[in-house]
Image: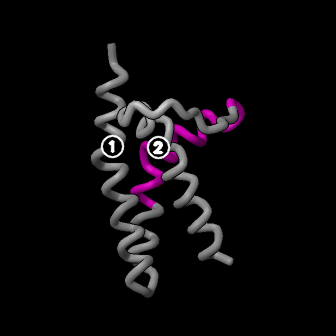
């Protein structure tokens, strides 16, 4: 059950990057969002992916380790890039 929750949070973290990635690639798709989760979304983008990535790297299996590294890289590189891009 712990792995299922971990995978769901990891996929949700990647889902949160989709609007910025689509905008960056000039693709006109707007994934559905919920205003109710605004603070949770921000926390996931700022620190959640790093924490979830770290937890995934501690799991057994090559896929878990690679998926964890991808999440860490997304949060360390893309989050500051998209924040910098959004600043006036």
Q: Residue furthest bottom?
A: 60
Picture coordinates of residue 6, whole percent (x, y): 57, 68
Q: Secondary structure at mark 2?
A: helix
Q: Using the rendered view, name the quadrant where residue 71 is placed.
A: bottom left
Mark 1: few/some/many CA within 10 Å (<14, 14-19, 20+): some
Picture coordinates of residue 72, whole percent (x, y): 35, 58
Residue 78 located within the stretch drawn in magenta:
no
Q: Main secondary structure of the magenta part?
A: helix
Q: In the figure, is residue 86 to the left or right of 45?
A: left
Residue 23 to residue 76: above or below: above
Q: In the figure, is residue 60 to the left or right of 82?
A: right
Q: Mark 2–mark 1 contact, CB under 8 Å?
A: yes
Mark nearer the N terminus (2 vs 1): 2
Q: Using the numbered discs, state the Cα–Cα distance from disc 2 to disc 1 in whole angstroms.
A: 8 Å
Residue 43 located within the stretch drawn in magenta:
yes
Pick the front one: 42 or 27: 27
Q: Which residue is mark 1?
A: 78
Pick the front one: 11 or 26: 26
Report the magenta residues as a range: 35-51
Q: Which residue is mark 2?
A: 17
| Picture mark count | 2
| Residue ID at (45%, 70%) | 55
Q: Quadrant of the N terminus?
A: bottom right
Q: Using the rendered view, name the quadrant where residue 36 is placed.
A: top right
Picture coordinates of residue 20, whole percent (x, y): 43, 35
| Residue ID at (58%, 59%) | 9
Mark 2: few/some/many CA within 10 Å (<14, 14-19, 20+): some
Q: Using the rendered view, name the quadrant where residue 22 is placed.
A: top left
């Amino acid at each position: 059950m712990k792995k299922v929750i971990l995978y769901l949070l990891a996929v949700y973290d990647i889902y949160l990057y989709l609007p910025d990635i689509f905008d960056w690639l000039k693709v006109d798709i707007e994934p559905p969002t919920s205003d109710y989760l605004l603070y949770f979304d921000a926390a996931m983008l700022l620190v959640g992916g790093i924490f979830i990535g770290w937890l995934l790297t501690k799991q057994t299996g090559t896929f878990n380790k690679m998926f964890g590294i991808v999440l860490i890289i997304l949060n360390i590189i893309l989050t500051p890039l998209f924040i910098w891009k959004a600043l006036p």
